[in-house]
Amino acid sequence: MVATSPEFTVRLARSAADLRAAQRLRYEVFVAELGGGGAMVDHDARLEQDRFDPFFDHLILCDAARPGEVIGVYRVLRSDQAAAAGQFYSEDEYDLAPLQNTGRTLLELGRSCLHPDYRGGSAMVHLWQALARYVDEHGIEILFGVASFHGTDVEALAHPLSYLHARHLAPDELRVRARAYQPMDLLPPDEIDRKRAVIETPALIKAYLRLGGCVGDGAFVDHAFHTTDVCLVMDTARMNDRQKGLYQRDAAK
């Protein structure tokens, strides 16, 4: 599974060196830039890693102009891989029973990041297209995963969290719930500043919402990573034609 452009190649990590390159980018983004941490983070080697890495598939984005370097990452975990790992990564934060009880094929997404030099351009489109092909190849029906706001002060995030709860809450049958429950409906609907909420919502979360994604019930404050997490759920059967077009269009166009 390879997608190429004059500059970019997206493929699955195939070796220990590929994985280390992905973990090196993750360290620069999640640890050095955002102040995150974790029990298995290797500060000497500058690698962000955890016990789940051996079970995930890792989509890596490379630029021919920077050989040996990974400039974008998406890690993905199918149900069979989660069974081998003993759980999905986000089960520590959310009760995933509603998704598991659907009997449909699931894919967990995580650790999505780009090198700072490639943000705001076409790089993320290439990762999305590779993900779309992966979803098609494996017959995935529901995608989910935690996405983060930087910081752990939920009051400072009252407008975007309240807006997500009011406008994008998952339907009952897909509504996962945070285990260490942090309410998201911090403001009454008529007190939410929609413009501020949208501005303060990270680009990745807004991208999922444009594709028809929704959020679970409650946020999870992750002190190790210094983030406030929401669980995003995307049911491919609920995507309209416009959303499918955004998701599946040819990245080369």
Image (spheres, grey):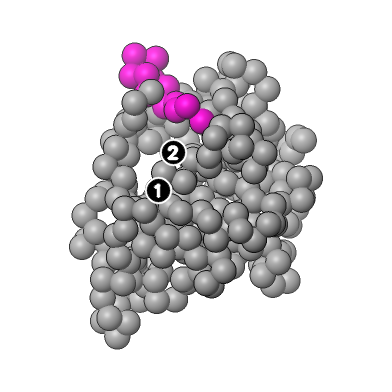
Foreground mark, 2 or 1?
1
The residue drawn where x is 37% and y is 19% is 42
Span of residues in magenta: 41-52
- Which corner quadrant of the image does residue 29 belong to? top left
Q: Secondary structure at mark 2?
A: helix
Nearest to N terminus: mark 2 or mark 1: 1
Instruction: Name the spot of residue 55 as percent of width and height, x first.
Output: 59, 30
Q: Indicate which disc residue 93 carries.
A: 1
Name the amino acid type tagged 2.
Pro
Residue at 55% x, 65% y: name it: 174
Check the image and report above or below for 20 versus 167: above
Front-most of 35 and 71?
35
In the picture, measured across the screen, residue 206 lies left or right of residue 229, that is right
Image spot of residue 168 (x, y percent):
47, 71
Residue 201, image x, y percentages: 38, 61
Three-letter code for the amino acid on which mark 1 is drawn:
Glu
